[in-house]
Image (tube, rainbow, N blue to C red):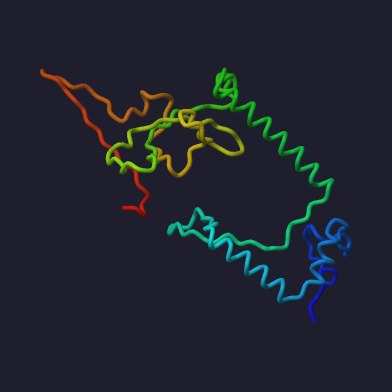
Amino acid sequence: MRETPSEIAVVSRYDEMHAAGAIRPHWQRLIEALAQMPAQDYARRQTSAQATIRENGVTYNVYDDVAGRARPWQLDIVPFVVSVMDWQTIEAAVIQRARLTDAILADIYGSQKLIAEGHMPPRYVSGYLLTQPSPGPPRLLGADASHAWFSVWAPPYGWVDLDPTNNLLPSDEHITLAWGRDYADVAPINGIVTGGGDHVIEVGVDVLPMERL
C-alpha cells in the first residue's frame, strides 16, 4: 500500500507542502490529481521528461569537479506550487533587486559615482578572451589578442567582473592574466629597448578549451 502525501510524517524542518500536519490549500488540487494517477503513468511521464532532457543536452556542471563532467539535469515532474501571497513576495523582491542592479550598472557605465565615493572599489583586469568566429571561414590561429575588462567589489558577492566592450558578464571564456589599478599595473609587455633600427613586435594568441586540444 502506497502512502499518500498526507500520511507522510512531517520532520523538524520547513515543509512547503504541509502545515500543522495538513496539506496546504494551494497544494490540495495537485495532490488530489497525483493520488488519482496510476503509478505506471507517473513513471512513464518521469521517464519521458528525462529522455527529453538527454535529447536536448540539458546539463549542469559541478564547479569543484576537476574532471569538469557535464551531468544531465535532474527534473521531477511534480511542480513546486507557490501560493499567491508567497509569489507576490518573491515578485516584489525580484523587481527590487532588478531595479537595484540596473541602477548600479547605469552608474558603473555612466558617472561612476559609486566607484568615485569608494562604495564599490574597482580593479582593471587584463587577460584573454575565447573568440567565436562566424560560421563559414575557418578559425584563424593566433588571432585571439589580449583583452581587458574591469571588476568591482560588491559584497556579499565579492569581485564582480563586467565586460563593457562586449556588453556581458565575463564567463569561463574570459581568461584572467592579471589585475591592478590600471593598465600600467598589468601591461603584458613592459620595458625599454635600446639600439638602432626599427623594432617590430608580433604577438599571436590562440585560446581553445582543453577538450579541443
Q: Residue 29's x, y, as percent? A: 85, 61
**Quadrant, the N terminus:** bottom right
Q: Is residue 194 left or right of residue 35?
A: left
Q: Residue at x 48, y 38 (%)?
A: 170
Residue furthest toward the front? Answer: 136
Task: Tell me if residue 75 comes above or below residue 133 in the rendering.
Answer: below
Q: Position of residue 62 (x, y in %)?
A: 52, 56
Please give left or right for residue 116 compared with residue 82 in the image: left
In front: 18, or 39?
A: 39
Q: Position of residue 90 (x, y in %)?
A: 76, 43
**Residue 79, located in which quarter of the rendered image?**
bottom right
Q: Nearer the viewer, residue 95 or 117?
A: 95
Q: Which residue is situated farthest in the left direction here?
A: 196
- Image coordinates of residue 141 in percent, x first then y, are 27, 41
Q: How many numbered discs?
A: 0
Residue at horizontal 68 percent and vertical 68 percent from the top:
45
For this rendering, which residue is in front, 6 or 58? Answer: 58
In the image, farthest residue toward the bottom: 1
Q: Residue at x 11, y 19 (%)?
A: 197
Quarter of the image for residue 68 reads: bottom left
At a point 77% along the width and 37% down the height, the residue shown is 92
